[in-house]
Image (cartoon, grey):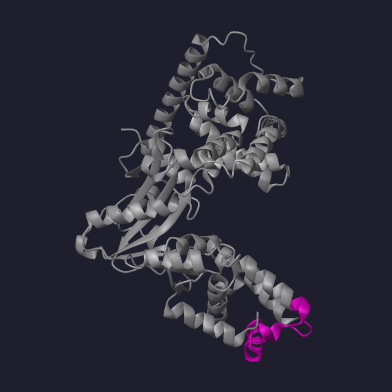
Amino acid sequence: MLPQPLMCAFRGTLKSWRHRAVLKAAFGALDFGNCRWLSSPTSGAVSGMEEILARVVSPLPTYETREKSPPPPEANSLEFMHFYRSLDKGDKLDFLARLSRDFGVDHKSVSEFAGKLLHTQLRDLATILQVEDRLRYSLTPRYKQLLNHISRVEGGVKFLVDLRADVLDIISSKSSESPDLRDLNGTLKSLLSEWFSVGLLRLERITWQSPCEILQKISQYEAVHPVRNWADLKRRVGPYRRCYAFTHAAMPGEPLVVLHVALTEEISDNIQSIVREISILDLEEDVNKVNAAVFYSISSTQTGLQGVELGNYLIKRVVRELQSEFPHLAQFSSLSPIPGFSLWLQGILSQYRKEGRGLDLLSEQEWQEVEQVTDLTPGTNAIDALRKLIATSEWMRSERLSRFLEPVLMRLCAWYLYGEKRRGYALNPVANFHLQNGATMWRLNWHADTSPKGVTNSCSIMVNYRYFLNETSKNSALYLQNKVITASGQVLGLVSQFQKNSKL
């Protein structure tokens, strides 16, 4: 019997050969009439772009014929996809800029209908509604019809997901400041939100018997705690572990968002016991030992679905699934990383160093202890010593340093999670995600992730966001509407210590 990795490799290669053969046969059978495939856009790229866009982006039907117009040939969608894939990164930017600018909303038509709407305000309701509907239709970008038709060809939805990923990359990198491109992004997000609504998603439990391709993707997409090898992956889908993913019929074999769960006797306070525990591989589950479900990793796999609500629905579905399997299960919690804490802390220390406000962050006695535990040489600033200590992670190798830093870093971290805001909501993205879902900021855990990544990103601290099922709706509403964070006594106590010792 072939080892699992070799079997997966063999099956993947065989599938690739079949896929190429099918594609070759399909394209050989298609007759696109006068369509010209432009596989080398660098030669006459501008004219090629204009030509292909003029050919494949059909005019928007008139309002009267919008439901009677025949759909454009499928070849238009295939030609657009083929041409776009042949472009390099720079040409893709130019192509998307032209698509969004030249084939967007007809602003003149919108202005005309807006004027008509103003003049009909004294008319009967039926007339007003009809003019409003015409105005609404005139706000449809011309390219939206093409996007809709692309979604109906094989592989089209995945293409549009990847297309939006490119648009997001352009916007985030500020390669273009075009408002038309931002409007294209909004149109794509709106369409993808409809196509990937929760009612159209399928919940799948991933096990060691799942197809090799799925297991490999689960391993590759893991963004929180990287999978080290096949034994590690087997453990994460084995006894006392659950792995779930949302999939979509339009993207078969492609997990969209993945949630890893540990079934434990009590809510875990460190990640090492979950991802590095070897002894559970061959165990049979004892239902009496399953008292808590700990969500220790959730990863979105498709950049193009950013902003499309999937993760929160996945957690809710998994809770129902686990309650069905373990009716007595009542404790649900995350064990979450705190990305950005160390970076934020370094920034605060640097700022206070420049402003000479060290005593606004730590007490005089604590700064004296910094000097003692770091064996500070004369002339060296204590803030600089603390910054270096945290940046190099040297303190992890010293029990003395670790013991000193624990109360300091724990209260600073509590404030970072609870007190640092962006537009009134939690600055930390993981905190914001769980708080929107209605979770309680429940417990900070010291030395919860001692991996290099955990120490570098969050000084080894992790946080439990506890899901009290009878309170999640109320907590979510309080957070979203009033920006109120629900937190436990431990967290609030640490915040109080910070406020007492610090003056941010």
Quarter of the image where one finds residue 458: bottom right
The spot of residue 143 in percent (x, y) is 61, 30
User: Count of labels shown?
Assistant: 0
Work out which quarter of the rendered image holds the C terminus and state it. bottom right
Residue at (22% x, 58% y) in the render: 326
Quarter of the image where one finds residue 330: bottom left
Residue 61 located within the stretch drawn in magenta: no
366 lies above or below 297? below
Question: Is residue 359 in sight in this rendering?
Answer: yes
Residue at (38% x, 39% y) in the render: 200
476 lies above or below 198? below
In the image, 189 versus 283, the foreground residue is 189
In the image, 152 versus 314, the foreground residue is 152
- Relative placement, left or right, of 199 versus 400 is left
Quarter of the image where one finds residue 294: bottom left
Looking at the image, the residue that sits furthest to the bottom is 365
Work out which quarter of the rendered image holds the N terminus and state it. top left
The spot of residue 425 in percent (x, y) is 55, 66
Question: Is residue 276 in sight in this rendering?
Answer: no
- Relative placement, left or right, of 209 versus 82 is left
The spot of residue 48 in percent (x, y) is 72, 20
157 lies above or below 476? above
User: Magenta residues, as a range?
Assistant: 353-380
The spot of residue 484 in percent (x, y) is 49, 71
Residue at (59% x, 37% y) in the render: 135
Residue 361 located within the stretch drawn in magenta: yes
Residue at (64% x, 38% y) in the render: 116
